[in-house]
Amino acid sequence: MTIRVRQNAPQTLQFTATAEGHELPLAMPQPQGEGPDPHDYFDTALGGCKALTLMVYAQRKGLPLESVGVDVVRDASEERKGVYRLTAKLTLHGELTDAQIDELLVVAEKCPIHKLMTAVDVQVSTLVVRPE
């Protein structure tokens, strides 16, 4: 899959990313722009993955999970030192036992994006392609 990022107009800091046919606004954070910025999408990927993973798991296992809310809290105060902290706060709705909640917490820790962010060697290559 390719995600395309294109500038909305020359000399601006507003872009549109297209993923799977969906357009996503992209800008600098305030006061330079209106956001959401790339960090927001990084953090959103974690929250979205946890929510989706929990719902799919609960449906497969027949757990009484009705809905999931995820708040991702960012602490980027030490990002320049190499530490970027995210806390995912899960709100689980449904008549769940303590054991089921513990089970879902273990599953949330194993969502694919969590693993990608913490346990995978992500390698990024950057190339310059001349316009045609």
Image (cartoon, rainbow, N blue to C red):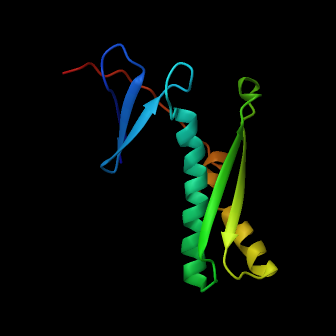
Task: Say above or below: 22 vs 126.
Answer: below
**How far from the left and from the top, in percent, is residue 61?**
60, 84
Residue 63, horizontal then vertical, whole percent? 64, 83
Q: Residue at x 64, y 57 (%)?
A: 70
The image quadrant that residue 93 belongs to is: bottom right
Give the x, y percent position of residue 95: 70, 82
At a point 36% along the width and 21% down the height, the residue shown is 128
Residue at image x 30%, y 20%?
9
* Left/right of residue 111 with respect to residue 25 in the rendered view: right
Q: Nearer the viewer, residue 116 or 10?
A: 10
Q: Is residue 83 visible?
A: yes
Q: Closest to the observer: 29 or 52? A: 29
Q: Is residue 128 left or right of residue 121?
A: left
The number of callouts visible is 0
Quadrant in the picture for residue 78 = top right
Q: Which quadrant holds the C terminus?
A: top left
Judged from this view, the residue extending furthest toward the bottom is 62
Question: Residue, x 63% and y 46% (percent of image)?
Answer: 117
Relative to 64, residue 103 above or below: above
